[in-house]
Image: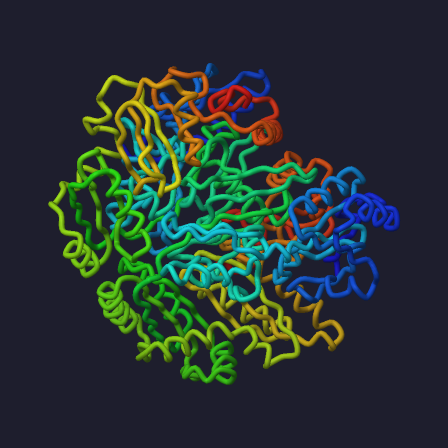
Amino acid sequence: MQETADLDDSAALLEQVNQALANATPLRIQGANSKAFLGRVTAGEILDTRSHRGIVRYDPTELVITVRCGTPLSELAKVLDAAQQMLPCEPPAFGDGATVGGMIACGLSGPRRPWSGSVRDFVLGTRVITGLGKHLRFGGEVMKNVAGYDLSRLMAGSYGTLGLITEVSLKVLPKPRQSLSISLPMSVEHALLRLAEWGQQPLPISAACHDGESLHLRLEGGEGSVAAAHDRLGGELLDPSYWADLNEQRLAFFDEDQPLWRLSVPNNTPRLSLPGRQLIDWGGAQRWLKSDAQAPFIRKVVAEAGGHVTCYSHGLTDTPFQPLPDALLRYHQQLKQQLDPQGIFNPGRLYAEL
Amino acid sequence: MNILYDERVDGALPEVDKTALLQALRTQLPDLEILHQQEELKPYECDGLSAYRTTPMLVVLPRDIAQVQGVLRLCHARRVPVVARGAGTGLSGGALPLEKGVLLVMARFNQILQIDPAARTARVQPGVRNLAISQAAAPFGLYYAPDPSSQIACSIGGNVAENAGGVHCLKYGLTVHNLLKVDILTVDGEHLTLGSEALDSPGLDLLALFTGSEGMLGVITEITVKLLPKPQSAKVLLAAFDSVEKAGRAVGDIIAAGIIPGGLEMMDNLAIRAAEDFIHAGYPVEAEAILLCELDGVEADVRDDCDRVRQVLEQAGATEVRQARDEAERVRFWAGRKNAFPAVGRLSADYYCMDGTIPRRELPGVLKAIAELSAEYGLRVANVFHAGDGNMHPLILFDANTPGELDRAEALGGKILELCVKVGGSITGEHGVGREKINQMCAQFNSDELTLFHAVKAAFDPGGLLNPGKNIPTLHRCAEFGAMHVHAGQLPFPDLERF
């Protein structure tokens, strides 16, 4: 078991990239393929990252863990758990075997995101195989590092379009001493008002979701603050497994047949009037929509609120990510051209033009 | 000295006819304030790194974004280098002007455009001072978390350009963690919005890439930052140790106990004595090291954490642990630390402030090596350390009027930074590379990595007109002046002790 759990296969990955460069073959980077439903449908020779795996370094008192891209998220969680630490951004796995590389490339964060920060916020350093066929290191294993451009954080959420992430160093934190989840029945409108009000107060909220009936809150911190907040807010106790079910989209809401859309909006956006059903997460900043409405209409409504839309139903639209303004798209293309001049890394996954 | 722009190794700059440029600016932007006479240009010849000075060809002081756009378009068309500058408090020479370039001063954009308490955001112009944001947010019980020590004077545009830090980074993050949206103008004056008022945006995370890019990729015109509710309570513990090793281990022990302090600072004996002499904070001057540990948050948690930390510190061998009895004493404890730089400045005609980061476990070895280097170079070094996040600020004491001392201080500083890289750290934690650490970049990154950085630059500024010579050294410069590249784990200096 130990041999398969810890393997440096970077030489083979570099070789595959160099072959692809030599033959001008586009690559389709994949780990467990758990997030293949996100982004555009692309072709390309599969580059499987799972042979390059294992924890490279972990010293809990440094609050930094360095992990190879093919390491399963579950393994990362187990190692952190044993030291009473966590990756606070709670990346969803969306399936068995989901890998660390996929987590970084997709950059998705869970319910704690508005309070803790996103996957990108916990990236300290990366090793990347570039479009020039080199295995390079950016950032590092220290909390503060402003030498050179921040290519490490740029990799988060790039869907593998800028290079092959082989290794990542992440900031981790101690788990909160106390965690308690509650439900408060109230309308969406009322919940959004309360969240805006509570957001200005030092309350230990670490997750806030409204399912149409009730506001669900998670309180985390020391024993004293959690107890005081519970006393003040009241509410019925909620099984904490709710948050994992929300994060992994296992709630009944996600079962319905209609297409699923993710709406990312300013946190104090009022209830959005859109056909279909909505579930509010991230204290108002992330809204899930089950709707048959057309993409341009949803995008227009959400853009007017200052947000953007991602389609989570695979293949439904050719632009699952919100199209970029022309000037911004041009700079995306120029950056892609510079970092991946032959266009071999996940071409078209993010946008057709990239 | 090889720090000022040197066309031989940093690349040839376009020849610019100053008179013609001045004429064109006056014609096309009649309302733009332009400084062009020697005595007017003088005050702009350096930023916070005042040992290095270059008189800019012209200084422009725009008052509206259209003027900034006009300047950029005109300079782009005429191939004139542009260096942007905020309040000029940067410590790495990031806003050091060029003789053949225009200095674009953004300080007049000093308006707070909006504080939105419900969204917990502030929308501000780039010339707004860091502290002014927290002051404007205070009536709503909110504040802007990153607090570089220059926060009373430094501008938020510069904070974004440098990805500024402060003493609360471990818990509250750097500038990059506290931004929502940045508006920029590209080298040819095109407007881009990076990020949004939502927590993420479609496409690549260019907001992360631009943060800390030192004015190399675009000029910042507007910023939306996140605001946080002010912690209900903050308490400070002061612990004295008879060795820096013990103090270093105590830091790890606090983290291991599952506590993330709001601030965790260490000072060595020279810094303690200097600060005590200056501020009379009540520091124990016999101690080899002190730790200042601030715990903030909800009242009940802070009280519990104080008890826990006190226990940890005592077990770690602290000779004394004191808790600030009241707010006045808390402020006094911090005043000593916050004034450590000027305090050390009283011991010496000049001092040179370094900014390396290291994994915390390497601290004892690095401090020992710094002491050895200090003896070798015959210059005293005081150490002030953001212990929570591994960011060291060794202060090298020297006298610029003594021939050779500045050169020696620079050489010693370079050695300290290379030491940081060697133990797996970085040459800069929060001050930026600028011009100051341009040669040490060659130690932290190999030529392939530097080549990729140049590729990023080329995507946004192919002509290399924005802040040329800063942040990323040319390969030519590294060949000529750079220290040998060292990667963690692949030490090219087998004769040196490993820490």
- Splitting the image into 4 quarters, where does residue A241 fall? top left
Q: Residue at x 75, y 51 (%)?
A: B31
**What residue sits 62% from the left and 60% below the top?**
B87
Q: Position of residue B304 (x, y in %)?
A: 22, 66
Residue that appears at 22% across and 46% down? A218
Residue B209: quadrant of the picture: top right
A194 or B443: which is nearer to us?
A: A194
What percent of the width, then of the height, locates residue A123?
43, 43
x, y percent for residue A76: 31, 39
Give B231 or B409, whichever is nearer the viewer.
B231
**Which residue is nearer to you in this view: B211 or A13?**
B211
Color theme of the render: rainbow
Answer whether residue B168 is visible to the viewer in this image.
yes
In the picture shown, does residue B184 fall above or below B379? Answer: above
Picture quadrant where residue A290 is located: top left
Residue occupying image coordinates x 43% and y 59%: B137
Q: Position of residue A159 (x, y in %)?
A: 45, 28
Q: Is residue B177 left or right of residue B326?
A: right
Horizontal side, residue A150 vs residue A227: left or right: right
Residue B495 in sight in this render: no
In the displayed structure, A242 sits above or below B297; it is above
- Total tally of numbered discs in the picture: 0
**B48 over B94 or under it: above or below:** below
On the rendered image, what quadrant is the N terminus of chain B found in?
Answer: bottom right
Q: Residue furthest left?
A: A236
